[in-house]
Image (cartoon, grey):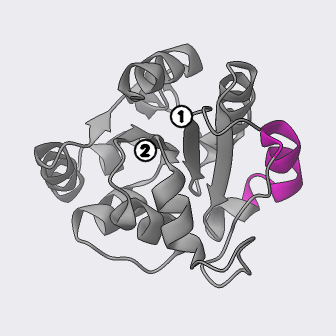
Amino acid sequence: MSSARKTVIVGVTASIAAYKACEIVNLLRKDSFDVKVILTKDALEFVTPLTLQTLSGNKVMTGIFESPENWTPVHTSLADSASLILIAPATANIIGKLANGICDDLLTCVTCASRSPVLIAPAMNENMYNHKMVMANIAKLEKIGYKFVGPVKGHLACGYDAVGHIAPVAEIIKEAKKMIK
């Protein structure tokens, strides 16, 4: 791999929309990005590291205490390598943790330690998305420069057709490319 390749860290959280991360990772890699995936512990209930490792061509990280491939702490080495951090899908939980500086897993630690741009693609129930605390957390993150794409109106796992569906993959990829320096 050439060092000239831009690195996108894709964070995957525990949403039924996690399967969309597979397509996102695949398309980014096809566009010649070096894609590194971080799965939250609960995201492991929806997608497997093997699937995302195969699609990304890189080891998938799931825990902050995993042995790094070099001597540096894993969260800072990942943070330093990022041209962009893309969290897709993003739950209310991850949005809340980031907005309040809670660093209790690999994804939150990497995001907090990185100076790269951050793009978040929320996916959750409409009532959760529209909750005042979630809206306040999104506003806090936007104020510090984080960008959001979606959610959109669509069929949700709870059976409703409502806002909360992850943005279309093509739209997420388009926004990610615009943000990569």
Which residue is disc 2 drawn over?
125
Residue 96 as seen in the image, left or right of residue 78? left
Q: Where residue 19 appears, x then y in whole percent?
A: 71, 39
Q: Can see residue 60?
A: yes
Residue 149 included in the magenta stretch of the image: no
Give the extent of the magenta segment: 45-57
| As drawn, 59 above or below 62 | above
Residue name at image x 14 percent, y 46 percent: 139
Q: Where residue 32 appears, x then y in whole percent?
A: 69, 24
Residue 88 as seen in the image, left or right of residue 180? right
Which residue is disc 1 drawn over?
156
Amino acid type at circle 1 is Leu
Label 1 neighbour load within 10 Å: few <14, some 14-19, many 20+: some
39 or 68, which is in the foreground? 68
129 or 161, which is in the foreground? 129
Give the SS element for disc 1: loop
Amino acid type at circle 2 is Asn
Which mark is first along the chain, 1 or 2?
A: 2
Residue name at image x 49 percent, y 48 percent: 82
Residue name at image x 31 percent, y 63 percent: 98
| As drawn, 104 above or below 123 | below
Magenta stretch, overall SS: helix
Q: Where residue 2 appears, x then y in whole percent?
A: 71, 35
Q: Residue furthest bottom?
A: 65
Residue 52 included in the magenta stretch of the image: yes
Quadrant of the drawing holding the N terminus: top right
- Marks 2/1: CA–CA distance: 7 Å
Quadrant of the drawing holding the C terminus: top left
Give the SS element for disc 2: loop
| As drawn, 37 above or below 159 | below
The answer to whether the residues at label 2 and label 1 have Cβ atoms under 8 Å apart is yes
